[in-house]
Image: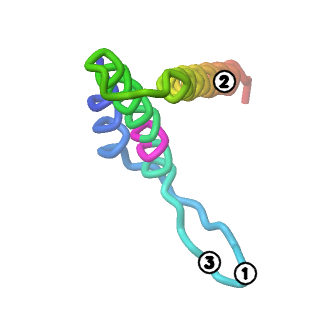
């Protein structure tokens, strides 16, 4: 399942939204939208790193360090997303083990 399919699953999910108070203004944040945005940002970083690698291979990028920075940024955002997913699953499993 690729990133785009995962984001479609979350965009179709009906998850209650919560309110966040900021500067006496209340705005509603939908968890599914927030998660979808985060996944899209990870995907954008991956796409950017791929484009930079292609430009380097074509000889259109002079600074190799820019390509390495884009690549590392993409790797870090992906690793962060994986860790967050793991923590969410651990929390879900722990909640499911609770005896009510």
Residue 20 image-quadrant placement = bottom right
Could you tell me how far apart the alpha carbons at marks 1 and 3 are, in whole angstroms?
A: 8 Å
Q: Secondary structure at mark 1?
A: loop
Residue 4 image-quadrant placement = top left
Q: Earlier in the sequence, mark 1 or mark 2?
A: 1
Find residue 26 and name its label.
Answer: 3
Marks 1,3: beta carbons within 8 A: no
Q: Is residue 24 left or right of residue 60?
A: right
Q: Residues within 10 Å of mark 1 (few under 14, many from 20)?
A: few
Q: Residues within 10 Å of mark 2 (few under 14, many from 20)?
A: few
The location of residue 28, given as percent across then percent down, is 53, 68
Q: Is residue 31 left or right of residue 60?
A: right
Q: Secondary structure at mark 3?
A: strand
Residue at image position (68%, 18%) is 97
Q: Nearer the viewer, residue 21 or 69?
A: 69
Could you tell me how far apart the alpha carbons at marks 3 and 2 are, in whole angstroms?
A: 28 Å
Residue 85 is at least partly visible in this image:
no
Q: Is residue 20 left or right of residue 27?
A: right
Residue 45 is at least partly visible in this image:
yes
* Magenta segment: 36-40
Find residue 45 and name its label.
Answer: none
Looking at the rendered image, the quarter that the C terminus falls into is: top right
Answer above or below: position of 33 versus 4: below
User: Is residue 92 located in the magenta-colored stretch of the structure?
Assistant: no
Q: Secondary structure at mark 2?
A: helix
Name the residue carrying label 1.
23
The location of residue 87, given as percent across then percent down, is 66, 24
Looking at the rendered image, the quarter that the N terminus falls into is: top left
Name the residue carrying label 2.
87
The location of residue 23, given as percent across then percent down, is 73, 81
């Amino acid at each position: 399942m690729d990133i785009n399919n995962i984001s479609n699953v979350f965009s179709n999910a009906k998850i209650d939204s919560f309110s966040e108070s900021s500067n006496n203004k209340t705005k509603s944040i939908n968890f599914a939208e927030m998660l979808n945005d985060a996944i899209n940002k990870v995907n954008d970083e991956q796409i950017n790193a791929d484009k930079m690698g292609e430009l380097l291979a074509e000889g259109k990028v002079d600074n190799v360090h820019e390509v390495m920075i884009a690549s590392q940024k993409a790797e870090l955002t992906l690793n962060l997303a994986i860790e967050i997913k793991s923590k969410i699953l651990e929390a879900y499993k722990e909640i499911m083990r609770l005896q009510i």
